[in-house]
Image: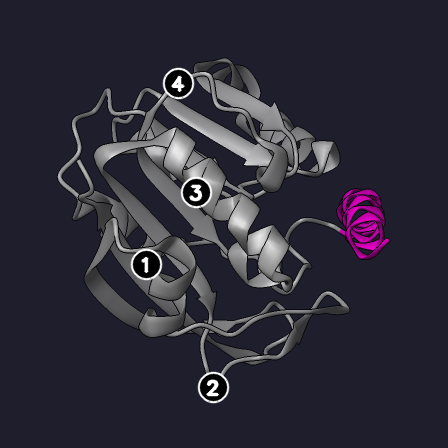
Amino acid sequence: MLGYRFICDDQQYKMNNGQHWQSVYRDRSADEVSWYQSDPRVSLSLIRGCGLAPDAALLDVGGGASVLVEHLLQSGFCNVTVLDIAEEALAVSRRRLGPEADKVSWQVTDITEFSPDRCYNLWHDRAVLHFLTSPRQRKAYRAVVEKALQPGGHLVIGAFAKDGPTRCSGLEIVQYDASRLLEVLGPQFVLREERKEEHLTPAGKSQEFAWFCLQRVDD
């Protein structure tokens, strides 16, 4: 019965999670949410630092309405996938990009249920992992990373730091430092770079983020 309860809890989480993020983007403008960035400079700096070719396969997890995708296209990357649980968030980006949206692959799914049909050179995640508060969710996230990221590939992950918020969008989060992140991802990943960022929300509130660039080295 305990295992059955965990399965039911996960199913309830997935249903509520999808509904939550859909409602966020139906009810508020994309530039009003607390995580909005007009200039994703840390993401871009870490991605560029990986030394990827223009045709490298990039996956932006939880990219939704983020403007990172157009910055990647403008930087010359031509093989970009944006994944989000909220179709409404992806629709915001598609409308903003106009005809350029056809250059991007769009995936609507919960990252813990993503079944990649290809391998990626880089996985970017700003503020998705820290919403996965149960060990089962984090284990599922790790399993998807292992399926999706090719050996030698890079992970760029941004999450609330140890001195950052404990909640976001009304939801509990998990704060991260390098040791906690490496516990989640396992020994096949090594930390290449670590940074801190003070994110200023549209409402003027300061939030401390921790950023990590890791590389898969198991094979």
Region of the chain picked out in magenta, as a range: 1-28
Looking at marks 3 and 1 on the same chain, the residue that comes earlier in the sequence is marked by 1
Residue indicated by mark 2: 163
Q: CA distance from mark 2 to mark 4?
A: 37 Å
Could you tell me how far apart the alpha carbons at marks 3 and 2 are, in whole angstroms? 25 Å
Q: Which element type, helix, strand or loop, lies under badge 3?
A: helix
Percent across and percent down for residue 34 are: 63, 65
Q: Secondary structure at mark 2?
A: loop
Image height check: is 59 above or below 197? above
Q: Residue 210, relative to residue 24: is it above or below?
A: below
Q: What's the distance in space between the residues labelled 2 and 1, CA to CA?
A: 18 Å
Residue found at the very far bottom of the displayed protein: 163
Residue occupied by mark 4: 118
The amino acid type of the residue labelled 4 equals Arg
Mark carried by residue 42:
1
Is disc 1 placed on a helix, strand or loop?
helix
Judged by depth in the image, the label closer to the viewer, 4 or 1, is 4
| Residue displayed at 53% across by 56% down | 129
Q: Residues within 10 Å of mark 1 (few under 14, many from 20)?
A: some
Residue 170: % across, % down = 77, 69
Q: Position of residue 212 (x, y in %)?
A: 31, 61
How many marks the image carries: the answer is 4
Q: Earlier in the sequence, mark 2 or mark 4?
A: 4
Whether pointer 3 and pointer 1 mark residues with C-beta atoms closer than 8 Å, the reply is: no
